[in-house]
Image (tube, grey):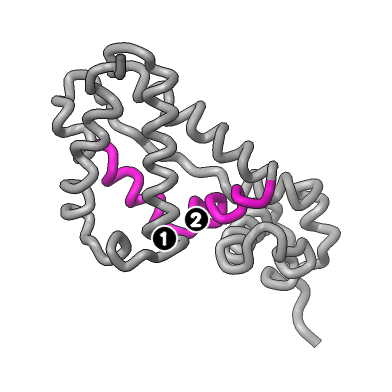
């Protein structure tokens, strides 16, 4: 017989979030179950519901991350990719949370909404502050480029992109980022 777990709500919640991030990253949103997450932590599935309500709310909590984008005011347009991409690389490669969200967003409306929330709250304000015109469109197009880059590099693992080092990928992306954010508006 195993010893009962000590009851520490904060620790249990943190363990559940870590287990959920691992499950969502490995199994995707659809195949991850509350029962599997609970089993990974060694608790009753009812506790997952107690802490998070349902799978959608657990996913929203597990998929919460911060990009920590720098202040781009005064950054030379040619240097924007060098200022932005390291922040994205850090999130993409840190713990699988973003990649789980990215994979899940393809099939889950809740995950897609979470992705939109992250871009609306963290990316769009940083980008609209530096664009010469059409900030909404420019931020949206850069978001599409970034999501496409992450999908190609980490989900599809296209060798032509996945095998590039950070510096090389940033160099290739720099003209695209510059043109989207600071180039002339198409007439």
Residue 101 is tagged as none
106 sits left or right of 65 in the view: right
Q: Please report the residue visible at 22 percent of the width from the left and 52 percent of the height from the top.
A: 169
Q: Which residues are magenta?
A: 83-108
Whether residue 51 appears in magenta in the rendering, the answer is no
Q: With respect to residue 26, does 86 lie above or below?
A: above
Task: Give the farthest residue toward the right.
Answer: 46
Quadrant in which residue 72 is drawn: top left
Instruction: Name the residue carrying label 1.
Output: 154
| First along the sequence among labels 2 and 1 | 2
The answer, for residue 143, to whether it is visible in the render is yes
Q: Out of 73 and 12, give the one closest to the viewer.
A: 73
Quadrant in which residue 135 is drawn: top left
Q: Please report the residue visible at 28 percent of the width from the left and 43 percent of the height from the top.
A: 85
Q: Could you say whether the residue bearing mark 1 is in a helix, strand or loop?
A: helix
Q: Position of residue 8 (x, y in %)?
A: 69, 57
Instruction: Name the residue carrying label 2.
Output: 99
The answer, for residue 15, to whether it is visible in the render is no
179 sits left or right of 44 in the view: left
Q: With respect to residue 113, does 111 lie above or below?
A: below
137 sits left or right of 160 in the view: right
Q: Please report the residue visible at 80 percent of the width from the left and 57 percent of the height from the top.
A: 47
Circles 2 and 1: CB atoms closer than 8 Å: yes
Q: Position of residue 187 (x, y in %)?
A: 30, 14
Q: Residues within 10 Å of mark 2 (few under 14, many from 20)?
A: many
4 sits left or right of 60 in the view: right
Count of numbered circles on the image: 2
Q: Position of residue 186 (x, y in %)?
A: 30, 19
Task: Give the farthest residue toward the bottom.
Answer: 1
Dominant SS type (magenta): helix
Q: Residues within 10 Å of mark 1 (few under 14, many from 20)?
A: some
């Amino acid at each position: 017989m195993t010893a009962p777990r000590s009851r520490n709500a904060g620790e249990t919640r943190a363990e559940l979030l870590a287990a959920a991030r691992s499950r969502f990253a490995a199994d995707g949103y659809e195949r991850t179950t509350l029962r599997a997450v609970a089993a990974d932590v060694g608790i009753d599935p009812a506790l997952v519901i107690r802490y998070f309500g349902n799978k959608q709310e657990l996913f929203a909590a597990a998929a919460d991350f911060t990009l920590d984008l720098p202040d781009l005011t005064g950054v030379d347009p040619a240097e924007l990719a060098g200022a932005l991409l390291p922040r994205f690389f850090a999130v993409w490669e840190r713990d699988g949370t973003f990649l789980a969200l990215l994979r899940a967003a393809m099939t889950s409306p809740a995950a897609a909404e979470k992705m939109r929330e992250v871009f609306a709250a963290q990316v769009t304000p940083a980008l609209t502050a530096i664009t010469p015109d059409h900030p909404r469109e420019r931020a949206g197009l850069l978001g599409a480029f970034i999501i496409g880059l992450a999908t190609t590099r980490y989900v599809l693992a296209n060798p032509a992109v996945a095998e590039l080092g950070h510096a090389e990928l940033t160099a290739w992306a720099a003209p695209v980022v510059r043109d989207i954010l600071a180039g002339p508006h198409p007439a």
